[in-house]
Amino acid sequence: MTVDTAAYPVTPRNRVKRMHERASYDRAAVHAVLDAAMLCHVAYVIDGQPYATPTLFWRREDTLYWHGSSASRMLRHLKAGTPACLTVAHLDSLVLARSGFNHSANYRSAMCFGTARLVEDADEKIEAMRDVVDRFYPGRSALLRPITQQEAKATTIIAMEIEEAAAKVRAKGVGDDEADFALPIWAGVIPVTTVLGAVQTCPRLVAGVEPPEGLSIFAENGRLDDALLAGQRLYEDG
Amino acid sequence: MTVDTAAYPVTPRNRVKRMHERASYDRAAVHAVLDAAMLCHVAYVIDGQPYATPTLFWRREDTLYWHGSSASRMLRHLKAGTPACLTVAHLDSLVLARSGFNHSANYRSAMCFGTARLVEDADEKIEAMRDVVDRFYPGRSALLRPITQQEAKATTIIAMEIEEAAAKVRAKGVGDDEADFALPIWAGVIPVTTVLGAVQTCPRLVAGVEPPEGLSIFAENGRLDDALLAGQRLYEDG
């Protein structure tokens, strides 16, 4: 038996049940969804109550990192960590069919399962505080005012190794029942894109300071997902 | 004592701890975030494991509805329902500061807490199946091929009355430490917007069928959040 290192293991936790033909367990497919995003939702259970907390996150190999949240207080008491699920979803288009039932949306999503732990090692934490800047803004941490001890103390970072994951993608046109295509009802697809606007320089900027080169991936009218994918490649090569 | 019907009650479950100055418990503030979105993340606990499931949702007064998911099987066995958290987050801009610590993002988010239940009443289900179309595409359900019994049977819809909720919004420029503004480091804001593309008519459309009037809220290059807010107003005015 060979272990498929190109794919995450499939268990009852991450096996996609609904529309399973849209699913993939390949590492590359999961990473492509994750790396195109900045915002995720993390699900935790605190005292029996589930929370879906929106937060910025980033990926380093098979580890996901995010900033402290309502879970950090809980995690301080749970040295072994706690089960979590980190999900990313991109909405790509609205799909209007000839029946209500076949209305749909195109999307790319990834759900990652693992055990969330507090980053407590001082070196790992400082490195993560630099990484969160450099992953989104290539080369930026070296240009900034250094991190203070007080800031490191006030920052909580959570890490989770991806144990299992699944990507789910719909990327096609109207999927009507065959007989319905003959009906005189309008149907079509409305694309949705998340784009970057013109950079707004801080009004208190010291005169003469130019935007750094690393910002060029965020060109006006570019797609946010493309910029983030480019940033992740630079971060991995960097 | 008067009950504040304009705001959701504040309990340990929905009280915002981190950056609490960004929080609001007003119904109108929470609804403004929800109604500008189509995609949410629902957190459930299944056998001790939390799941953050991305799904389309809609609001009718204080009830949130979404389509069947991994939770529907669980809910069939839990007639009393199960605790859930439905979250919406809009990313509005990236905020680059002079220190790593003050890097941030502008966003609008809402977390809603309640008890998820399966919609089992046949009339409530058919109404919800029409509502999910009309809420997003004003007046559209009347133009479609009618819902079949088989489709109603194959559809699972989950409902949750909002018991508690909180909105959290950051909408400002760079928030550097006062002393850092004098540093020769570039800082600024990069806006992020989710916009609509040109409608792609289904290639199998019957000749001569025109797009319906209700689609006018999805004008090319318009903002998705504005279109969805307009759709919700039309849905409420009915």
Image (cartoon, coloured by chain):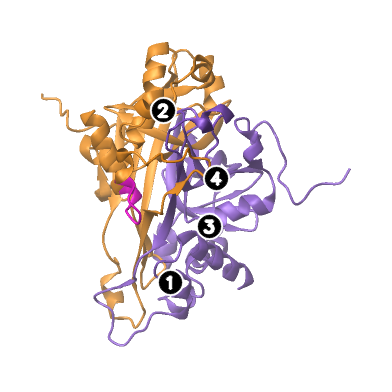
Chain colours: A purple, B orange
Let me know if residue B223 is in the magenta part.
yes
The single residue placed furthest to the front in the displayed view is B208
Asked whether disc 1 touches disc 4, contact meaning CB atoms under 8 Å apart, the reply is no
Q: Secondary structure at mark 3?
A: loop
Q: Given the image, on which type of amino acid does mark 1 rest?
A: Ala
Q: Tell me the tag on residue A219.
A: 1
- The Cα atoms of the two marked residues, 1 and 3, are separated by 16 Å
Q: Tell me the tag on residue A36.
A: 3
Numbered disc in front, either 2 or 3: 2
The verdict on a common chain for dots 4 and 2 is no
In the image, what residue occupies the spot 37% across and 54% down? B195
Let me know if residue A170 is in the magenta part.
no
Q: Position of residue A211 (x, y in %)?
A: 39, 80
| Nearest to N terminus: mark 3 or mark 4 | 3
Give the extent of the magenta segment: B217-225
Q: Which residue is mark 2?
A: B144
- The Cα atoms of the two marked residues, 1 and 4, are separated by 25 Å
Q: Given the image, on which type of amino acid does mark 2 rest?
A: Leu
Q: Is residue B9 above or below residue A115?
A: above
Asked whether disc 1 touches disc 2, contact meaning CB atoms under 8 Å apart, the reply is no
| Nearest to N terminus: mark 1 or mark 4 | 4
Quick one: A205 or A120, which is closer to the camera? A205
Q: Which residue is mark 4?
A: A109
Q: Given the image, on which type of amino acid does mark 3 rest?
A: Ala
